[in-house]
């Protein structure tokens, strides 16, 4: 799957992943009203509104980005109906040939970790049959509990030729409370980076990049520079662009000299672009067009930054 991701990045010239992180406040009134007219102001109505909102955005961007990243918490808050919307979104994205990164941030051990891995990336055994659950192409995971938490995911990924992005240095302001703590004179995120390289060392695609990558926030460019050296052949998923303040110029250290090695996430900066002053002309009726334009603007920003580094 890492080779498909790289192929689509090259084709679109957009090392971008769109975070499909819907909240009702992002969804235009006309979509909410239609869903509520059919299902009432219920969890089912919310799930329908989320699905219709996602579908229009996907239809507007599928040909200009390689991947999407639905954050499961945004769906789980609506209970079973939200999870249904998550599953429909994943299925529809794959029908549009988008690479799907399930932003699930799971991190447990033993049979629990195995169940998470099977549910999101693999196939579960039911009698004599095996079935995919959510069937994402990649998943984000938390390595805090060590190899016991990661190994079951790596095993399933090897079986299914799918991939992982492991939290190393996250973009949030308090990430340093733990991730910057020194252990034997080096910050924890460096030790995590070395483990990511180790976990993915025997699992490499035709392009020379591992199926196992890391999450490194663009809000910490100096740490990103260090981790790029530690992880020369691992892809880095880079959150923090747009709404969290980062711009293309902050990204250059995350990429290798070949222009590959990183994929940059923007969530509400794209899916809620219609609410920004810059894209106000599109209005709520053309919210999906605003999302497409935000992708194209982000693509140009990153392109210019890489050309000028």
Image (cartoon, rainbow, N blue to C red):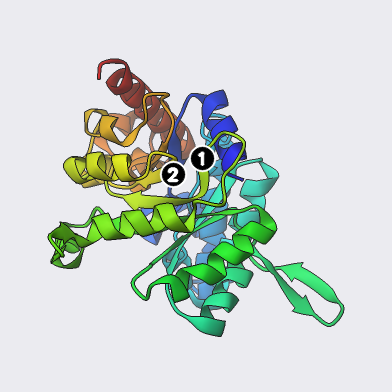
Element under disc 2? strand
Among the two numbered marks 1 and 2 on one chain, the one whose residue lies closer to the N terminus = 1
Q: Quadrant of the N terminus?
A: top right
At 50% from the left and 77% from the top, the residue drawn is 79
Circle 1/circle 2 CB separation < 8 Å: yes
Asked if residue 85 can be seen in this view, the reply is: no
Indicate the position of residue 304 as horizontal and vertical percent values.
31, 18
* Above or below for 229 versus 33: above
Residue furthest to the front = 184
Residue furthest to the top = 308
* Above or below for 219 versus 41: above
Indicate the position of residue 24 as horizontal and vertical percent values.
40, 60
Displayed quadrant of residue 190: bottom left
Q: Which residue is mark 1?
A: 209
Indicate the position of residue 33 as horizontal and vertical percent values.
49, 58
In depth, the one of 235 and 263 nearer the eye is 235
Q: Is residue 257 left or right of residue 93?
A: left
Q: Which residue is mark 2?
A: 234
Element under disc 1? loop
Indicate the position of residue 268 as horizontal and vertical percent values.
35, 47
Q: Residues within 10 Å of mark 2 (few under 14, many from 20)?
A: many
At 62% from the left and 47% from the top, the residue drawn is 93
Asked if residue 133 can be seen in this view, the reply is: yes
């Amino acid at each position: 799957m890492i080779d498909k991701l790289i192929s689509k990045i090259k084709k679109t010239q957009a090392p971008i992943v769109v975070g499909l992180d819907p909240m009702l406040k992002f969804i235009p009134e006309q979509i909410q009203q239609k869903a509520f007219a059919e299902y009432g102001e219920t969890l089912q109505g919310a799930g329908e509104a989320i699905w219709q909102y996602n579908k229009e955005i996907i239809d507007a961007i599928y040909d200009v980005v390689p991947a999407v990243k639905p954050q499961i918490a945004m769906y789980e808050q609506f209970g079973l109906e939200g999870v249904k919307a998550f599953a429909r979104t994943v299925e529809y994205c794959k029908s549009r040939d988008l690479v799907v990164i399930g932003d699930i941030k799971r991190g447990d051990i033993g049979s629990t970790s195995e169940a998470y891995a099977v549910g999101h990336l693999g196939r579960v055994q039911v009698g004599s049959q095996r079935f995919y659950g959510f069937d994402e192409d990649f998943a984000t995971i938390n390595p805090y509990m060590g190899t016991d938490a990661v190994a079951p995911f790596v095993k399933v990924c090897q079986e299914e030729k799918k991939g992982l992005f492991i939290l190393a240095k996250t973009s949030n302001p308090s990430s340093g409370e733990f991730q910057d703590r020194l252990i034997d004179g080096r910050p924890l995120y460096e030790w995590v980076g070395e483990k990511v390289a180790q976990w993915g060392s025997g699992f490499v695609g035709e392009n020379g990049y591992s199926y196992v990558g890391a999450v490194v926030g663009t809000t910490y460019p100096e740490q990103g520079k260090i981790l790029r050296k530690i992880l020369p052949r691992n892809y880095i998923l880079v959150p923090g662009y747009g709404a969290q303040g980062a711009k293309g110029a902050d990204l250059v250290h995350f990429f290798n000299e070949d222009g590959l090695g990183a994929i940059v996430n923007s969530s509400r900066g794209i899916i809620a672009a219609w609410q920004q002053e810059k894209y106000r002309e599109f209005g709520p009726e053309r919210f999906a067009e605003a999302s497409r334009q935000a992708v194209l603007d982000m693509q140009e920003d990153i392109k210019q930054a890489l050309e000028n580094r």
